Image (spheres, rainbow, N blue to C red):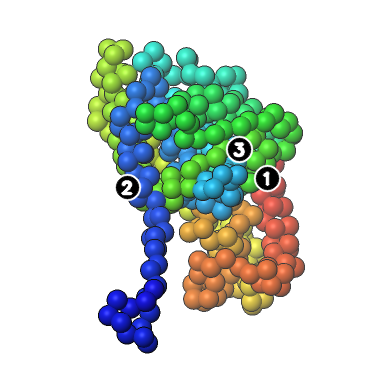
């Protein structure tokens, strides 16, 4: 564009620019669903919180969706979080609808969910990366499948944009996989189907989850108290909130440390898996191979003997590289063999 002042050496270009969406545009939508939508159950809150926990703890499970700006999640992962959230509530007989108390009258609660309640499987057992075998594998897979179908049929189907019949979430379920061995990784959880989430909603949950989560919990607790009051029961403040608390496995390395110290007491050689240095009791640390900050897993397979200096000043909370794992492979395999043999002897 020519200069309006007539300067031949000056020309002008008009550019229109937009700021990237930080997720804040989704807040009015989420606020409306959480606080304003009519609810005959807590299912809409359950769906939002199940997705929000993935956005916070497992965002790598998201894949680009088929739309212009949406992401696709394994519905098995959403259903897994759903079970993890509802199991303490139902076990405590906290009502999730006006006519519900305990496991009765909830669509996703069938024989499989009831089996979870009686099998000793805890909420923290139902986490991404956990593995199950035999009857427990079948039970968990069926419970995830039941939850996924309920999510697709109920909250995903009835959560719509304001003044519209257009659904916010699009859920598709598949046949429940059947196996005597179940590892709850991304590939397995995707076998249950998928659910698409609008991009701005996903970004809001990732970036503003610290504010969204408390609102979800507060509204969930309020609804539960209303349902209970309708049944003639008054729930003290804090009871529902305690059942809604998201818990992670304890950061407990005692088993691995006991095994390592027992080996040293016998005079066995024990080495730092990262450096190969021979260990003594006074320099022994137990390292989370996949760091707790990335994945709170204290299972024995994830706990390695390490030199205290290496663990606390070099490895710290970093993910090990492929080269580091390849270098450590012989010592890791030796440790696993000895550790699991020790566990097997103790269980006899």
Is 203 rendered above or below residue 287? above
According to the picture, the residue beneath numbered tag 1 turns out to be 187
Please state the horizontal and vertical placement of residue 195, each as a whole percent of the image: 56, 37
Front position among marks 1 and 3: 3
Task: Write the residue at 50% across / 41% down.
Answer: 197
Above or below: residue 203 compared with residue 279: above
Vertical arrangement, residue 40 with respect to residue 79, above or below: above
Which quarter of the rendering shows the C terminus?
top right
What residue sits right under mark 3 in the picture? 194
Separation of residues labelled 2 and 1 (CA atoms): 30 Å
| Picture coordinates of residue 241, whole percent (x, y) | 32, 35
Discs 3/2, front: 3
Q: Residue 141: x, y in percent?
A: 65, 32
Residue located beneath label 2 in the image: 211
For the residue pair 170 and 165, the one nearer the viewer reads as 165
Sequence-wise first label, 3 or 2: 3
Question: Are the residues at dot 3 and dot 2 in contact (C-beta closer than 8 Å)?
Answer: no
Measure the alpha-carbon separation of dots 1 and 3.
11 Å
Of the two numbered discs 2 and 1 on the same chain, state the one appearing first in sequence. Answer: 1
Local SS, label 3? strand
Instruction: Determine the residue positioned at 60% across, 44% down.
Output: 66
Relative to 9, 252 lies left or right: right
């Amino acid at each position: 564009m020519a200069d309006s002042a007539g300067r031949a050496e000056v020309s002008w270009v008009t550019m229109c620019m937009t700021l990237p969406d930080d997720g804040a545009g989704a807040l009015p939508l989420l606020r409306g669903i959480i606080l304003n939508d009519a609810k005959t159950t807590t299912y809409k809150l359950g769906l939002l919180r199940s997705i929000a926990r993935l956005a916070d703890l497992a965002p790598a499970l998201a894949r680009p969706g088929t739309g212009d700006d949406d992401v696709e999640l394994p519905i098995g992962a959403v259903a897994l979080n759903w079970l993890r959230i509802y199991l303490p509530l139902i076990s405590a007989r906290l009502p999730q609808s006006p006519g519900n108390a305990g496991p009765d009258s909830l669509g996703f609660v069938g024989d499989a969910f009831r089996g979870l309640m009686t099998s000793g499987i805890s909420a923290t057992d139902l986490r991404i990366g956990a593995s199950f075998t035999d009857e427990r594998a079948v039970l968990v897979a069926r419970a995830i499948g039941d939850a996924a179908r309920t999510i697709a049929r109920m909250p995903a189907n009835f959560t719509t944009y304001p003044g519209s019949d257009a659904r916010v979430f699009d859920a598709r379920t598949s046949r429940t996989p059947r196996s005597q061995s179940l590892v709850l990784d991304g590939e397995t959880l995707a076998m249950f189907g998928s659910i698409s989430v609008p991009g701005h909603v996903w970004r809001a949950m990732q970036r503003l989850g610290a504010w969204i989560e408390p609102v979800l919990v507060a509204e969930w607790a309020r609804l539960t108290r209303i349902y209970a009051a309708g049944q003639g029961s008054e729930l003290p403040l804090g009871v529902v909130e305690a059942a809604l608390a998201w818990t992670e496995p304890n950061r407990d390395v005692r088993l691995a440390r006991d095994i390592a110290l027992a080996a040293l007491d016998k005079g066995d050689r024990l080495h730092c898996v990262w450096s190969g240095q021979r260990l003594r009791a006074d320099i022994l640390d137990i390292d989370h191979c996949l760091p707790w900050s990335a994945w709170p897993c204290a299972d024995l397979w994830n706990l390695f003997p390490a030199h205290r200096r290496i663990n606390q000043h070099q490895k710290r909370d970093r993910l090990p590289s492929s080269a580091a794992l390849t270098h450590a492979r012989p010592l890791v395999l030796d440790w696993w063999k000895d550790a699991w043999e020790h566990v097997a002897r103790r269980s006899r």
